[in-house]
Amino acid sequence: MILDVIMDTLIDGVRLLPFLFLTYLAMEFLEHKAGDKMQNVIRNSGKGGPLIGSILGVFPQCGFSAAASNLYAGRIITIGTLMAIYLSTSDEMLPIMLSENVGMDTIGKILGFKVIVGMIAGFAIDFVFRKQEKKLQIEHLCEQHHCHCEKGIWKSALHHTIEIFLYILIISFVLNLVIALLGEEFLGNLILNRPVIGELIAALVGLIPNCAASVTITQLYLNGVLSAGAMIAGLLAGSGVGILVLLRVNDDRKENFKIIAMLYIIGVLCGLLVEALKIAF
C-alpha cells in the first residue's frame, strides 16, 4: 500500500510540473520584461476574468487551479476569477466518467452546472470585493519568496517550481496515505442516506487539497453512494491542489481562510439546491 501511495503521489506531482513551471515563467516575464504596461493591460482586462476562468477550469487536470493560485498570489487575476476557476475545476471527474462510459449528456450537464456556478459566483464576488480594493497590482515574486531573481527569469522560475513541487509532494503523500487507510467505503458510510449532512460532509471531502478527492467523490456517485446534491457539493468545493498551493504562496492567512470558507459554503448551498429542486444529471 505504501508503494502505491508513493507512486500515486509522484505521478500526480510530475503531472503538475509543466503547469507550475510555465506559470512561474510567465509571472517572471511579466515582472521583469513587461513592467507597468502589462500591469495596465491586465488591470483593464480583468473584469471578464470569471467568465474565462469558469470555462478554462473545466479542463480535467489539477494544474490549472495550481496555476490560478500562483497568479492570484501575484495579484494578476482577481479573487472572483480565482473562485470561478476553483468552482468549475473538473479535476479527475471527467476522465473517470468517460472511462465508465457515462453518457455525454450527463457529463455535459454536470460540467455546465459547474461553469454557470463558477461564473455567477466569480462576478458576484468581484463586485463585492472590488469596492474594498483600490487597484489590482502585480506583487514582486522576489519579495514573496525571497529568491535570487537576478539570476534570470528561467532560473528564478525553476527555483519557485522546485520549491512548490517539493511542498506539494510532501503534503500530497500524507493526504494520499490517510485516504488509503480510511478507504472509500468509510467515506461512503459517512454520507450514505444522510440528507443535508451528506452535502456538508461531501463538501468537506472536496476541500481535501488533492486530486484523490474528486476521484473519491466521482466513484462514490457512480456507485450510487452519493446523491446528486452531495456529488455537486463535493465537486464544487474541490479544487485539486489549488488550495494547497494558495496556502503556500499567499501570505494573507485570513484571506486564504475566507476563500476556503466561500468554496465550502457555495458548494453546500448549491448541493442543497440540487436536492431541493430534484435536479437530475
Image (cartoon, rainbow, N blue to C red):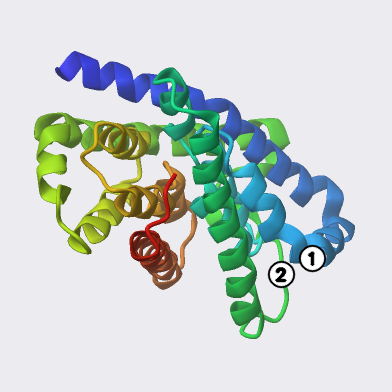
Seen in the image, is 180 located left or right of residue 34? left
Q: Residue at 36% x, 38% y: name it.
A: 214
Q: Quadrant of the N terminus?
A: top left
SS at mark 2 in the image: loop
Cα distance between the residues tagged 1 and 2? 6 Å
Q: Quadrant of the C terminus?
A: top left
Label placed on residue 136: 2
Q: Are marks 1 and 2 in contact (CB under 8 Å)?
A: yes
Q: Residue at 26% x, 52% y: name it.
A: 202
SS at mark 1 in the image: helix
Image vertical order of residue 36 relative to residue 145, above or below: below
Label placed on residue 43: 1
- Residue 145 visible to the viewer: no
Looking at the picture, tell me which residue is in the foreground, 118 or 171: 118
- Residue 185 visible to the viewer: yes
The amino acid type, in three-letter code, at marker 2 is: Leu
Seen in the image, is 139 located left or right of residue 36? left
Q: Residue at 49% x, 37% y: name it.
A: 106
Image vertical order of residue 83 relative to residue 147, above or below: below
Assess disc 1: are there few (<14), some (14-19) or many (≥20) residues with their C-alpha within 10 Å of its C-alpha: some
Looking at the picture, tell me which residue is in the foreground, 194 or 161: 194
Label placed on residue 23: none
Q: Position of residue 277 (x, y in %)?
A: 40, 64
